[in-house]
Image: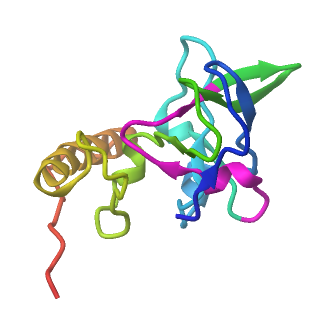
Amino acid sequence: GTGVRSLQCIRKGEVLDEYVGELKHASALTDLTYALELEHPGPQRVASRDAILIDAQLHGNWTRYINTSCNPSLQFMPAIVGKRYRMMIVATRDIDVFEELTIGYGDGSWLSPDVRVCECNEPACRYYAAARKEHLQEMWQFVVKQKTQAKGIPHQGPKYRPRKKA
């Protein structure tokens, strides 16, 4: 991705900004490149079929350009500001000037193995090569099961198909 670097030192716990964009129902999106699930800031969770996503593709800010990492320097933190839900970006550790800002977008970012490849180059990358393939198969089976159950369709096993080599 484009990537973002810090222009000053950032201390652990600092709020950098809010991830902004259009609010859309999960079923209405076809391109998930800049989509992020708006999480409830409390112990309650919304069922996945009712998920609302923040789509930053057309109306986002600089935060949509933060690259992913399996060892991120930032995290998403759901919050209520006034009477509105927000998805804030917070530093998880001290960050030096000119250091790349990275964040973990979660397992949902990797559900389409033909589209995205993790390039974080971290030694313990969760989504790289053989380990990534096995992890993706498990996640894909789980998502298919959840979606079919939400629609009232009995789960009929995994629908994962490995990418064909050209």
Where in the figure is residue 151, as x and y percent of width and height? 39, 45
Farthest-out residue, bottom: 166
Judge whether residue 38 is colored magenta: no
In the rendered view of the protein, which quadrant contains the C terminus? bottom left
> Which image quadrant is residue 86 in?
top right
**The magenta segment:** 58-77
Where in the figure is residue 108, as x and y percent of width and height? 40, 46
97 left or right, relative to 85: left
Farthest-out residue, right: 82
Q: Is residue 67 above or below residue 33?
A: above
94 or 83, nearer to the observer: 94
Question: What residue is drawn where x is 16% and y is 66%?
Answer: 161
Question: What residue is drawn where x is 51% and y is 34%?
Answer: 73
> Which image quadrant is residue 6 in?
top right
How does the figure colour the protein chain or chains? rainbow
Q: Is residue 92 above or below residue 49?
A: above
Where in the figure is residue 36, as x and y percent of width and height? 58, 45
Q: Is residue 116 above or below residue 120?
A: below
22 left or right, relative to 123: right
83 or 49, nearer to the observer: 83
Question: What residue is drawn where x is 58% and y is 58%?
Answer: 3
73 left or right, relative to 16: left
Q: Is residue 154 above or below residue 83?
A: below
Where in the figure is residue 127, as x and y percent of width and height? 26, 49
Judge whether residue 59 is colored magenta: yes
